[in-house]
Image (cartoon, helix red, strand yellow):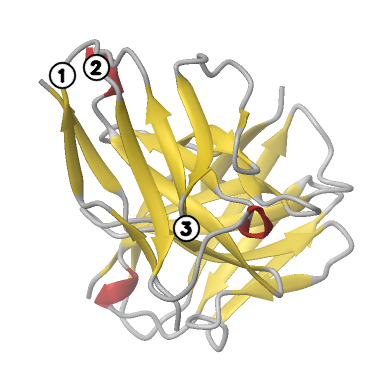
């Protein structure tokens, strides 16, 4: 069974740039996996940031961007702000209608 | 805009069936895919399954034997049933609209409802 991998934790300084990644335990992520990204703060429902690799969801500021980086999907936050401190989850489409989330990355802004 | 709201018992006994309903407001349930996702306390998200407005379904293989998702288009609602629950099924359960043709993402999400499995 293929596992979707994310960094467990990451830290960034205010105003800095950070790139979170989403990979596979076996193989490479491509656009055919339709990677999407979600932001979640404690006690809240996830918020959709990016879908189909690099399309920002409505209302998401352009300092959030999605891409493919090497064999992984990537979420880049430029000009990090204090309220970007959240958990970030990626989602990959595995085919046959099956979706799998990564384990999530806890981002600290300090 | 479309909003989703989960409802159902917050406490279920072990071995019984968990039942939740998601009410869709501000738009029609027709023509879309509707999903359930859960998150155990302190852990990550897990996709449970989806139903299309035609009634076709698809489930997470790890839960498939215990899950049933159905819908009631007259009430603009869809529902989740998870049988033979254990403490491992304790989680916040979210409903969401899923886009799945030539793409795959969830939006919007309901606020979530905590279901605890305990005697």
Position of B92 relative to B51 (above/below) = above
Residue under the point 31% across and 80% down: B86
Position of A15 relative to B67 (above/below) = above
**Secondary element at tag 1:** loop
**Secondary element at tag 2:** loop
The number of numbered discs placed on residues in the rendered structure image is: 3
Discs 2 and 3 carry the same chain letter: yes
Which image quadrant: the C terminus of chain B? bottom left
For the residues labelled 2 and 1, say whether their Cβ atoms are less than 8 Å apart: yes
**Secondary element at tag 3:** loop
Residue B85 visible, this angle:
yes
Instruction: Identify which residue, B30 or B13, lies in the foreground.
Output: B30
Foreground mark, 1 or 3, reads: 3
Report which quarter residue B88 is drawn in: bottom left
Discs 1 and 3 carry the same chain letter: yes
Q: Say left or right for A46 vs B40.
A: right
Residue under the point 69% across and 69% down: A97
Instruction: Quote the CA–CA distance across marks 2 and 1.
Output: 5 Å
Q: Residues within 10 Å of mark 2 (few under 14, many from 20)?
A: some
- Residue underneath mark 3: A71
In the picture as drawn, the residue positioned furthest to the left comes out as A110
> Residue B37 at x, y = what percent?
50, 57
Say whether disc 1 or disc 3 marks the residue closer to the N-terminus: 1
Residue under the point 63% across and 21% down: A58
Q: Say left or right for A29 vs B42.
A: right
Report which quarter residue B27 is drawn in: top right
- Residue underneath mark 1: A13
> Residue B115 at x, y = what percent?
35, 58
Mark number for residue A16?
2
Please, which chain is the residue tagged with disc 2 on? A
Please, which chain is the residue tagged with disc 1 on? A
């Amino acid at each position: 069974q293929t596992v979707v991998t994310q960094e467990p934790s990451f830290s960034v300084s205010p105003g800095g740039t950070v790139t979170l990644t989403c990979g596979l335990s076996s193989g490479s992520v491509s656009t055919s996996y339709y990677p999407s990204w979600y932001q979640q703060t404690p006690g809240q429902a996830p918020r959709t940031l990016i879908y189909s690799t690099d399309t920002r969801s409505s209302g998401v500021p352009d300092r959030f961007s999605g891409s493919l980086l090497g064999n992984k999907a990537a979420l880049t936050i430029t000009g990090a702000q204090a309220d970007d401190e959240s958990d970030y989850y990626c989602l990959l489409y595995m085919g046959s209608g099956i979706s799998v989330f990564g384990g999530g990355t806890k981002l600290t802004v300090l | 805009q479309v909003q989703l709201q989960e409802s159902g018992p917050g406490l279920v006994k072990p071995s019984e069936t968990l039942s939740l309903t998601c009410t869709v407001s501000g738009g029609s349930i027709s023509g879309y895919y509707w999903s359930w996702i859960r998150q155990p306390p302190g852990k990550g998200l897990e996709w449970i399954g989806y139903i299309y407005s035609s009634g076709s379904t698809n489930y997470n293989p790890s839960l498939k034997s215990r899950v049933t998702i159905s819908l009631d288009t007259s009430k603009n609602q869809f529902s989740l049933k998870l049988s033979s629950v254990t403490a491992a099924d304790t989680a916040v359960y979210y409903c969401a609209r899923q886009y799945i043709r030539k793409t795959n993402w969830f939006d919007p999400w309901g606020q979530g409802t905590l279901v605890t499995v305990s005697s």
